[in-house]
Amino acid sequence: MDAKDLTTFEAVARLGGMGRAARELNTVQSNVTQRVRRLEAALGVALFERSRSGARLTPAGQRLLPYATRVDALLDEAGRAARDDGAPRGTLTIGSLETTAALRLSPLLATYAHAHPGVDLVLRTGTTAEMVERVLSRELEGAFVCGPVAHPQLVSTPAFEEELALLSAPTAETITAALQQPDLRLVILRAGCSYRQRLEEVLAHRGIVGLRRLEFGTLEAILGAVAAGLGITLMPRALIGPAWRGARIRAHRLKPVESRVQTVFVRRRDVQPSSALLAFQSHVTREHVTKDHATKSQPAREKRP
C-alpha cells in the first residue's frame, strides 16, 4: 500500500470528486483515478461509488478514511520534523477560546512575534469542545481551552486563571434579583462552550434548571443582549471593560468555588512539537509563572466585616 495512494484517496474523499482532488494535488485526473484503483485492487474492496456528480465513499471507504487522514497528517509532521533544525520558523497554528484571545493573548503574541520573526502565527477561535477536537485531529498544534482537560492523548499546561462573574442588566442590583427576573433566560454561546456548562451548574446548585436559552455567535452580541435585559450570562470579570461596566451591565460576584476557572494550553501527546511550538510554550509558561508570582506577592486584603 503506497502512502501517496492513501493521500490521493483522502483528497478524493474530502473533496468529493476525482477532478477536484486532481486540482488540489496539482496533477491530472487520470493519475488520481489510477491511484484510487490501485489502492482498491490492493485492498480488494471498492472505496467509492462513482457517479456524474462525483465520488461517494462506500462503507469500506468510510472505515479506511480515518486511517488515511492519520497517515497524511503523520507524513506532514514527518516532513516538518525533518526540516526543523531547532530555529523557530514556519507557520504555527494555534487555537483559543474567544474570551482568552480577547483578554490575554495580545501581549503574549506580540512578545512571541517580536522574539521569533521567522514564525507566521495563525490563531483560530472557538469553544473548548471545538478546540480540543481540532487539536486531536491535528488541525491545530495546540490550543487554549478551559481546564481541567483529562484526555489520554493530550498534554495540558496551566496558562491563566480567570474569575467568572454572573452578568445581568444593571437594574438587577443583587444576584438574587438577577435570578428572580420574570421569564429569565440564559444568554450563551453555542454548545461546547465551557462557560455555558459552568453557568448551568451554578444555577442548578441554586435549584434553577430548564431555563430557555438565547444563543449568539459573538461576545459582543452576548453582552449587548444582557445589557438590553434579555437574560443573564457567565463571563470572565476582566472582560467587562469600561464600555460595558456600570450603567450598561452589572457583574455579580460568585463563590470562589464557582468563579475560579483555569485556562490551560493543550497539545497532542504523541506529536513531536515543532521548535516554533516549543518556543511558544516557553512564553506561555513564563507568563503563567510571572502572573502567579505577582498574585502571591500581593498583600492580603482585609476582610470586610
Image (cartoon, rainbow, N blue to C red):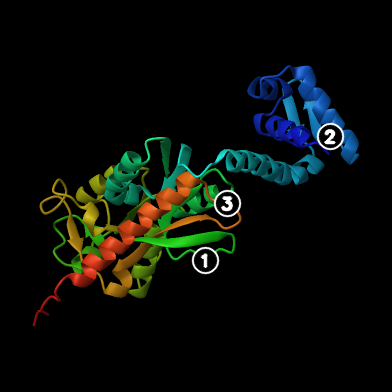
Query: Of callouts 2 and 1, which one flags the residue occurring earlier in the amino acid sequence?
Result: 2
Q: Residues within 10 Å of mark 2 (few under 14, many from 20)?
A: many
Residue beneath disc 1? 150
- The image shows residue 54 at horizontal and vertical percentages of 73, 24
The disc labelled 3 sits on which kind of residue? Gln
Mark 3 vs mark 1, CA separation in Å: 20 Å
Mark 2 vs mark 3, CA separation in Å: 29 Å
Q: Is residue 296 above or below residue 3?
A: below
262 horizontally vs 177: left or right: right
Q: Residue at x 11, y 54 (%)?
A: 246
Q: Secondary structure at mark 1?
A: loop
Q: Secondary structure at mark 2?
A: helix
Q: Nearer the viewer, mark 3 or mark 1?
A: 3
Residue beneath disc 2? 39
Mark 2 vs mark 1, CA separation in Å: 38 Å
77 horizontally vs 298: left or right: right
Q: Secondary structure at mark 3?
A: loop
178 horizontally vs 38: left or right: left
Instruction: Inspect this view and state whether residue 291 appears.
Output: yes
Quadrant in the picture for the N terminus: top right
